[in-house]
Image (tube, rainbow, N blue to C red):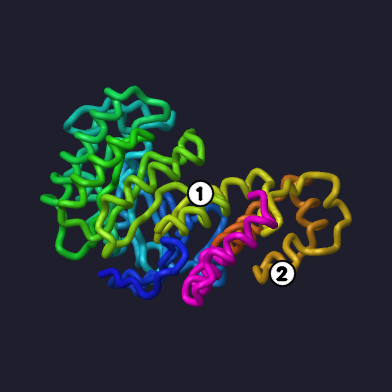
Amino acid sequence: MFRVEKKDENSRARSGSVETSHGNLKTPAFLPVATKGVVKTLDIRDLEELGANGLIVNGFHLWIRGLEAVEDAGGLHSFMKWDGPILSDSGGFQIIRKDFNFKISDEGFLLKSPIDGQMVLYSPEVCMQVHSVLGTDVAFVLDDCPPHPSTHERLEVSVKRTKDWAQRCLEAKGDDQQVYGIVQGGSDPDLRKRSSEELSGMAFDGFGIGGLSIGESREEMYSAVDVSLSNLPSDRPRHLMGVGSLAEILESISHGIDIFDSAFPTRNARHGTFYTPNGKFDIRKREFNGKKEPLGEACDCFTCRNYTASYLHHLYKEKEMLAYRLLSIHNLRTVISLVDDSRKAIADNRFGEFKEMYLTGSSA
């Protein structure tokens, strides 16, 4: 169940709450990515202190290595020791990655198992079985996510296949999970419109907007978001998948997006990049050698409360693993604080002013 609590009068931004069996997910929300049941380098205490309101995992990645341990633990919440909302992505995005050699057909994804070398089929029905074993609060349907750029013909196949798979997922779903459809269509407005209209007629609890932030321009992304949103029901949550930069999150909130997820903050942290409202920086640069201030002077994260930029520079220079954890904590706290502050600004009907002030001082 989704409830819109406040709408900004000068934009399409809105705040609300998604009710789940493991608590309410307050929106706008950013979900740290725990692909295989863990946010890289962080533990549950870190995530709780960061103020994470929910997590997202990847059903395909958990399935391909075997779900016996998760099932034996009684589901992912018990396995991870996380008692808040968990959403599980289907893994459709993996087809544009180089990690697996997929053969895609209308039946699903055919690939060689890394466990025993046998060919296995990941179909919409298998996908929903995986979600059921995981016991997550929200399950995303299996979708066909083509790369950017793709031909019009490939995008058409994707939209039709995604609709067909969405219907098969609904027919195979269990009783205890909310299910979100995923809009495809690339940057083609007509196909985006068609996909969102077709999915909006199905009994989904919410909707993901997929196939974006994969190489298209920001203008193309925002246009695709607008077309998708204008044809989706407004009484259900809208989740923009895979978007995690500060500027894109703020702009997308103003377009009416409720939920975000991305490995962007933690992945960049492991490469030495950190974020503040003033932009993005590389901790490996010599300018941070000897700097006694924290990464963000106004940041309340564990890293900034306890360590200087100079110390983090030293950790990265010496390739110490602690550096990855401390920078991941800072980056996630920066993004989570951004959506928390956005929610407050919407409640006070000053989101436009907040967004402008934030972006003026940030090049993120």
Q: In this rendering, is residue 48 above or below 310?
A: below
Q: In this rendering, is residue 35 above or below 4?
A: above
Residue, far left: 171
The answer for how far apart the CA atoms under marks 1 and 2 are is 24 Å
Q: Main secondary structure of the magenta part?
A: helix
- The answer to whether residue 114 of the structure is visible from this angle is no
The stretch drawn in magenta includes residue 361: yes
Q: How many marks?
A: 2
Question: Residue at 63% of width from left, 50% of height from top?
Answer: 364
Foreground residue among 7 and 196: 7
Residue 105 lies left or right of residue 353; in this view the side is: left
Residue 5 lies left or right of residue 274; in this view the side is: left
Question: Residue at 69% of width from left, 65% of height from top?
Answer: 303
Which picture quadrant has residue 151? top left
Residue, far front: 10
Residue 70 x %, y %: 32, 57
The residue beneath circle 2 is 298
**Of callouts 1 and 2, the N-terminal one:** 1
Foreground residue among 190 and 214: 190
Q: Pointer 2: residues within 10 angstroms few (<14), some, or many (20+)?
A: few
Residue 212 lies left or right of residue 63; in this view the side is: right
Disc 2, SS:
loop
Which picture quadrant has residue 122? top left
Quadrant for the N terminus, please: bottom left
Foreground residue among 263 and 316: 263
- Residue 263 tag number: 1
Q: Which residues are magenta?
A: 336-364
Which mark lies nearer to you, 1 or 2? 2
Residue 60 x %, y %: 32, 44
Question: Residue at 71% of width from left, 56% of height from top?
Answer: 278
Disc 1, SS:
loop
